[in-house]
Image (spheres, coloured by chain):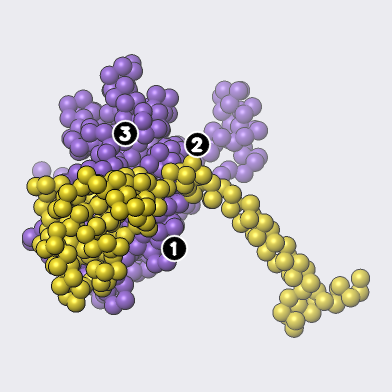
Amino acid sequence: MTDLSTTSTDEDETGGSRRDFLAIATSTVGVAGVALAAWPLVDSMNPAADVLALSSTEVDLSPVEVGQSITVVWRGKPVFVRHRTAHEIAEARRDDNADLVDPQKDADRVQKPEWLIVIGICTHLGCIPLGNKPGDPRGDFDGWFCPCHGSHYDSSGRIRKGPAPKNLVVPPYVFINDTTIKIG
Amino acid sequence: MSTPGNDKTFSNPVMNWIEYRLPIFSFIDNSVGSNYPTPRNLNYWWNFGSLAGVVLVIMIASGIVLAMQYTAHVGYAFESVERIMRDVNYGWLLRYLHMNGGSMFFILVYIHMFRGMYFGSFKSPRELVWIFGVMLILAMMATAFMGYVLPWGQMSFWGATVITNLFSAIPIVGESIVTWLWGGFSVANPTLNRFFALHYLFPFVIFALVFMHLWALHIHRSGNPTGIDPKSPEDTIPFHPYYTIKDAFGLGVFMIVFMAFVFFAPNFFGEPDNYIKANSMVTPPHIVPEWYFLPFYAILRAITFNILFIPAKLGGVIAMFGAVLILAVLPWLDRGKVRSARFRPVYKQFFWIFVADCIVLGIAGGKPPEGYWIPIGQAATAYYFLHFLVILPLLSKFERTLAPPESISAAVLQSNAGKKGAS
């Protein structure tokens, strides 16, 4: 008991009493406990199992003619599948060394050069760029044009002009056979 | 915030019984009653706070009954709103009140904020009143944004997509935050559901913040157009009946305007695209937020270039949030001792330039980002920050202010004498 009273009078020299230590330790453990208990609440807002279960899509490519594009839905997002013409492939390769915002070679963005598969969501703020339907504006680089804030993508889906910071994202996909892909 | 043992007595014995146990009647009397001394010279710019309070109550009342008819599911949300409009008794009235009430709330609060800036209401010792106000406008913005998503029209969906994508600009964790906000990989049913839950919750957060705002206000009490403190009993009058009647008159005028929109132009502030059901595969050609977000939307879009290592997209997001948050430190940016712009001839002019700048930002935010609207939006954004970060600190240091009157009553009697002399 005498010991306790000396420590509490020694506060200034030691920089804190045993009581302070206990108070800090208790509140630290308390805060950590609350943080741990809050995690299930926070994590419950992340994608649920049923949402995650819908995360792959198979696409039959056989009806898509050269020069044609289709839009498929994967995870609630549009995915652009473009059967590129020889001219579009040549353009995309020629521009590998152009002044790119997000430099990437065309070869790194495709598995087979005639099939360009990208997520159809502008990397700026998430609008769907135009250019996948006949008659849509394709922008200045023969790819896609986002009407929301004016981003232009080229025939490899790379950002060339406008506010978007990144190229159109290539989703994970595999060729199951020559004419079928599985996205996701 | 009365203490127990308040010796206030009433003629009604029931009131006395309650008062002895919970001094609620003296609390009311001290807050908005005859026992709350208020500067005698408040003008009509001082009506907007109480008007905003009335609109908050209207929003909560209409919102609760709307929630009883609304279905927060992507398959039914749009249809349930149409059912409210066509089949529910007075559903059209409730929805139009709630829709236009949102716009009215922002008009009132923006005027209330400009009032605070003009008359220096944010200055010592009322900084916390102002800061609770900034928290209120942030909470209002979040509530309004989530409410706009609920009808599940095209603008609801794409507005939600664009605004939630703002968080993807945060380095490293941005994408995970967006997925967490959505509860999936795009704006979808989980997103709609949580927005409905939060849209119901936030008004009560706003209510709590209003309570803090008023509590802080009642410590040092209302400012006034002269910006000087009341010095003697002649400078003040009881809140009730003088300002209750003035607020009631103002409420009457405001309700005429509000009801004119509700009954004669209910979709004036709306976007026709929001009567098209949300379609995640088609983006409307021109996405615009509600009018009250346009100035901030213009600031978001103004940053089209990288600033050092900050990419343009992140820069725009920082500028947009910064434009609101900078208000919180206004009391320390404008440190001039004289509160009211009446005695700050140079500040008064810069104040009106700032108001004009906000209007220009609002117009630029509503235009497609093409041609000369881009540099106009950028110049107006630059001026917005220049006003707070350069002009106000310099003015509060170097401006030669006029001498404020000796007291509030002196100022009032002088102006009355002036009016009589002129007539």
* Chain B painted colour: purple
Query: What residue do we see at 25% from left, 52% from top?
Result: A81
Query: What residue do we see at 17% from left, 30% from top?
Result: B265
In terms of image quadrants, where is residue B74? top left
Residue B216, image x, y percentages: 47, 52
Q: Is residue B410 visible?
A: no
Q: Chain of mark 1?
A: B
- Checking the image for residue B28, the label placed there is 2
Determine the residue located farthest toward the bottom in the rendered image. A13
Residue B196 or B48: which is nearer the viewer? B196
Query: What residue do we see at 67% from left, 64% from top?
Result: A28
- Amino acid type for the residue under numbered disc 3: Pro
- Checking the image for residue B151, the label placed there is 3
Determine the residue located farthest toward the right in the rendered image. A1
Secondary structure under tag 3 reads loop
A142 w.r.t. A16: above or below: above
- Amino acid type for the residue under numbered disc 1: Val
